[in-house]
Amino acid sequence: MKRVFIFIAIILVAAGLSCEVPRVQFNLGLDFPGDHELEHGSEKADFDSEFGLSPSLELLVPVNKQFHFGPGVEYQIERGVELEGNGDYSPAFGFIPVYLTGKIGFIPEGPVIPELNIHLGYAFMHANDDYKGNWDLTGDIYFAIGGGILINQRLCIDMLYRYQQGSMERSFYSGHHSILVTQRQLTLQFSARI
């Protein structure tokens, strides 16, 4: 956790030393239903997650006309998990990824530029009481890769494949137990660069 913040501080210092002016990018992601997996030892259970929204903010430092990098943070609004026969039980979860992003344009200039978009970082996990019960939540790796288009150097539309992990942990009389939580999904992201 401490390393993530040190890494982001280094990126911000590099941005301040850059000859180019950093740009801010505001994003709104529409998260499609995804694969939600719980793993405890050799036991696995797969569920479908529901649609969700994910606003995010990125600081992009231009290295040249085709490559930008910088830190980003996102808040995934809690979305449900589709369980059979859950009655009044409404489990919902989300993640808060803190990441480094890299955006590579395939051509240096033009009104429409195809881009490759990569995220790598740490995702904090959060959930409602119906999801976590008395378990403690921890975060883990966050990764996303996708492509899209940059329109007039201002508006972006991207499709991202996202992978994030967290865990639920609890100590019992029989010992410490941990359940690995993995979420995979596609996200359609709309962005504005300032």
Image: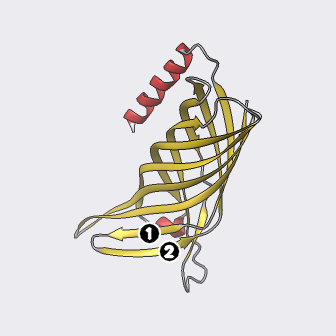
Mark 1 surroundings within 10 Å by alpha-carbon count, few (fewer than 14), some (14 through 19), many (20 or more) = some
Q: Is residue 86 above or below residue 76?
A: below
Question: N-terminal of the two: label 2 or label 1?
Answer: 1
- Quadrant in the picture for the C terminus: top right
At x 44% / y 45%, what residue is drawn?
A: 122
Residue 68 position within the rendered picture, expressed as x and y whole percent measured from the top left: 57, 30
| Left or right of residue 169: residue 83 | right
Q: Amino acid at mark 1?
A: Glu
Q: Nearer the viewer, residue 132 or 74?
A: 74
Residue 190 position within the rendered picture, expressed as x and y whole percent measured from the top left: 71, 47
At x 63% / y 43%, what residue is drawn?
A: 56
Q: Is residue 139 above or below residue 70?
A: below
Circle number at residue 143: none
Residue 146 position within the rendered picture, expressed as x and y whole percent measured from the top left: 56, 50
Residue located beneath label 2 in the image = 47
At x 52% / y 43%, what residue is drawn?
A: 118
In the picture, residue 57 is in which quadrant? top right
Residue located beneath label 1 in the image = 37
Q: CA distance from mark 2 to mark 1?
A: 6 Å
Q: Are marks 2 and 1 in contact (CB under 8 Å)?
A: yes
Q: Secondary structure at mark 2?
A: strand
